[in-house]
Image (cartoon, rainbow, N blue to C red):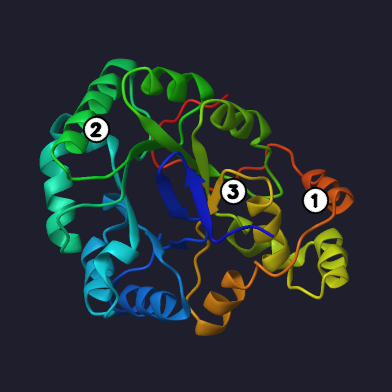
Amino acid sequence: MLSELLIKKSLKVPCMGFGTYKLTGRECTKAVDDALQAGYRHIDTAQFYNNEEEVGKAINNSGIDRDKIFITTKIFPTDFKRLIDATEESLRKLKSNHVDLLLLHWPSDAESTRKAVESLNEALAKGYTKNIGVSNFNIENVNDAAKRAPIVCNQVEYHPYISQQKMLAFLKENNMFMTAYSPLAKGRVTHNVVLKEVAAKYNKTISQLVLRWLLQQGDMAVIPKATSMERIKENLDVFDFGISDKDMEVISGLSGDNRITNSIWSPVWD
């Protein structure tokens, strides 16, 4: 049975997070509030999502101690040169004096990315964030960043239709963890016959099966998005069963290079 907490060194991360991409306005505030009331304690946002104010409002109005909520936000490449100022703007919007994890949202050119990593160090030293990491970086990018800063995480697209085994192995070997975004492939997993058959064996939904498959690989956090309380609770209910090794392999066998998230920048992939 997996713990709800992913622990790397002294870092404790709620491995089930709540994604907020494309959630804005009242819908975002309500969804984050519902997630917190349902039991989520890891909220993922980004400057590019244009919803940090809504996320901050929901967190501050939740009645839950700030120290019990793990907040991740990301800095877009266009703000790499002003990363400290951009981080301060995020903190004002989130109504918090720090985030728990600050990520570079995408890699840029080598020089800009390296300078941004140095700025991450500065944000860490200033107490603006408790941890730093990257997102959408390939192995070479992560390795270079980790030589310059205490990188703890790489957030990447990961679901049954794409393989991230090489990346996950690299992160584990270097005492980092992965955060999987779009873990349900934007709902596409719910139509898969193979996943439906496997999920039925465990009396779970396809979404629950896939989230468990990800978490069971270890050193993993997932950030599914949902708007209805039913789905929000459903995605959280994945800690009371385990998937057999054989079924883990069956699910992994669906993978290829089927990326479903359109690039919002110019990433360099493996």
Callout 3 touching callout 1 (CB < 8 Å): no
The residue tagged with tag 2: helix, strand or loop? helix
Tell me which residue sits at (29%, 20%) in the image: 114
Tell me which residue sits at (73%, 63%) in the image: 209
Q: Is residue 78 visible?
A: yes
Name the residue type under label 3.
Ile
- Give the label, 3 or 2, closer to the camera: 2
Count residues near mark 1 (Cα–Cα under 10 Å), then give few for <14, some for 14-19, many for 20+.
some
The residue tagged with tag 3: helix, strand or loop? loop
Q: Position of residue 237 (x, y in %)?
A: 62, 73
The residue tagged with tag 1: helix, strand or loop? helix
Q: CA distance from mark 3 to mark 2?
A: 29 Å
Task: Tell how many labels.
Answer: 3
Which numbered disc covers residue 141?
none
First-in-chain label (1 vs 2) = 2
Where is 38 relative to 195, above or below?
below
Tell me which residue sits at (10%, 41%) in the image: 85
Q: Position of residue 227 (x, y in %)?
A: 47, 76
Which numbered disc covers residue 260?
3
Which numbered disc covers residue 251?
1
Residue, disc 2: 120
Callout 3 touching callout 2 (CB < 8 Å): no
Q: Position of residue 167 (x, y in %)?
A: 59, 31
Name the residue type under label 1.
Ile
Which of these two is toward me, 111 or 221?
Answer: 221
Q: CA distance from mark 3 to mark 1?
A: 17 Å
Count residues near mark 2 (Cα–Cα under 10 Å), then give few for <14, some for 14-19, many for 20+.
many
Name the residue type under label 2.
Leu
